Image (tube, helix red, strand yellow):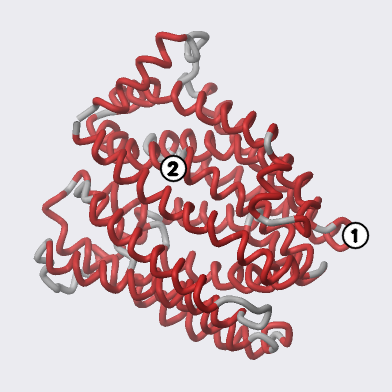
Amino acid sequence: MNNIKNLFYISTVQVVNYLFPIITVPIIARTFGPENVGIINYIAAIVGYFSLFVNYSFNYTGVRWLSRNPADKNVLFCGIFIVQLAIFIFCTILFSVVIYLFQDLQRYSLLCWVSYFSCIASLFTQNWFLQSFSNFKVIAIFSFITKLITFILIILFISDKNDLVLYSAILNVTTFLTSLTIFIYTFRKYEIKAIIPSFFFIKSLISDGKYLFLSSIVTNIYTTTGIVILGVLSTKLDVGYYTSAQKLMDVSKSIVLLPISQIIFPILARKFGEGKEQGLETVKKVLPIFIVISIMFLFFINIFDELIVMLLFGKEFLPIISLVRILSIGLFAVFFGVFIGGQVMLNLGMDSAFVRIQIIIAILSLFINCLLVRANGGLVTSIVWSISEVVISLYQVVYLYRRGVIIFSWDTLSYNSILGSIKYVLNKK
C-alpha cells in the first residue's frame, strides 16, 4: 500500500513537471520561434555542465547510503551539502571566466547569469533525502506549486521575442526559491543537526559516488555536449530543432518511465544490500513491466509523431519529425541503460566496466559530432545519440551475461511474468 501511495505521488510529480510545460511549450515555441528557443537551450546546456558538477552523484548515492544507514542522516546531510558548496564556489568562479573568454556568451551575459540560478538551485536541492524517507508527498506538493506559479507567470508576462531573459528568470529563479524552501523544510522537519563531518567521511562520500559521477560526465559528453557543439559549429536554429525533439523525448521518459523507476530504486538498493541473489531476483520481477512500457512508448511516439509536433510546437517545427523518430530509438535504449547499468551493474560492484564503455562511446561521439555537425546539423547529433545509447545498453547486457548474471529469460515477456511484475511493483512493501 505504501508503494501505491508513493507511486501516486511520484507520478503526480512527473505529470506536474511535464503537464505544465506541455501547456506552455506551444506558447513559448510560437512566441520565440526555433532560433530563440535554440539560444535559450544552448545557454541552458552550458549551465547544465556546472549543475552536473554541483549535483555530483548524490541524488543516487545519497538515497543508497541513507536507505541502508538511516542513523547517518545528520552527518550525511551536512557532508553532502559541504561537498556541494565547495564545488559550487569553484563552478561559479569558472563560469565567470567562461563568459569572459567566449564572445558568443558575452552577447548573452545577462541571460547566462539568470540561467545560472538553476545551478544555485542544485546546491539546495535535497530531494534525495526526502526520497530516502519515502516522503514523496512533500516533493509532489512543492513541485505542483512551483509549476503552477511558473505557468501563471509565463501566461501573464511572456508575449514577445525579446522576453528571453524574463522567461529564463521565471524558470530558474522560481526553481531556486523552491529548492531553498525544501532545503529549509527538510532541515527543520527531520531535525537535522549541523555538524562538520570528518575528513575521512567526506572522502568516503566522494569516493562512493565517483564512478557514477564519472558516468554522468561521460553521458553528458554524448548528450548535452551535442547541443553545445551544434551551437558553436552549426546554427542556433539547428539547436532549436534538436533540443525541441529532445524535449519531447524528455517529456515521454519522465511521464512513462521515471515514476516507476524512482519507486523501485530504493527497493533495489535495500535488496542488493541484503545480498546479490535477493537483488537480482527483484530485478527479474520488475523487468517485464519496464520492457512492456518502453515498447508501448516506441510504437506510440512513431505513430503519432507528426500530430504531437504540430500540437506542441507548430508548423515552424515540422522539420524535427525525422529527429523525433531517430531519438525515439535512443530513448528506448536509455531505459535499459538506466536500469541494467545504473541499478544492476553498480550494485554488483561493476563500476569500472560500467564507466569504461561510456568513455569509449563518449570519445567517439564527440569526434563524430565535431566532424559532421557543421554540414548535417541536428540530424548527426540525433543519430550519434541514439546509436550511443543502443551500443551502451547492448554492451551492458553482454557484459553481465559473460559473468553469469542472466536477468533475461525466454518467458520474461510472458503473460504471467508481466502480470506478476505489475503486482510486485504495486504491492511490494
Which numbered disc flags the more N-terminal residue, 2 or 1?
A: 2
Q: Viewed as shown, does residue 401 lie left or right of 59? A: right
Q: Amino acid at mark 1?
A: Ala
Identify which residue is drawn at 47% across, 38% down. Answer: 257
Q: Residues within 10 Å of mark 1 (few under 14, many from 20)?
A: few
- Mark 2 residue crowding within 10 angstroms, few (<14) / some (14–19) / many (20+): some
Residue that mark 2 sits on:
258
Q: Quadrant of residue 238?
A: bottom right
| Image quarter in which the N terminus is found | top left
Percent across and percent down for residue 158 are 57, 76
**Could you tell me which secondary element the residue under label 2 belongs to?**
helix
Which secondary structure, mark 1?
helix
282, above or below 190, in the image = above
The residue indicated by pointer 1 is: 375
Q: Position of residue 396 (x, y in %)?
A: 55, 33
Residue at 60% across, 35% down? 332
Report whether residue 391 is seen. Answer: no
Q: Residue at x 71, y 50 (%)?
A: 310
Q: Residue at x 71, y 45 (%)?
A: 324
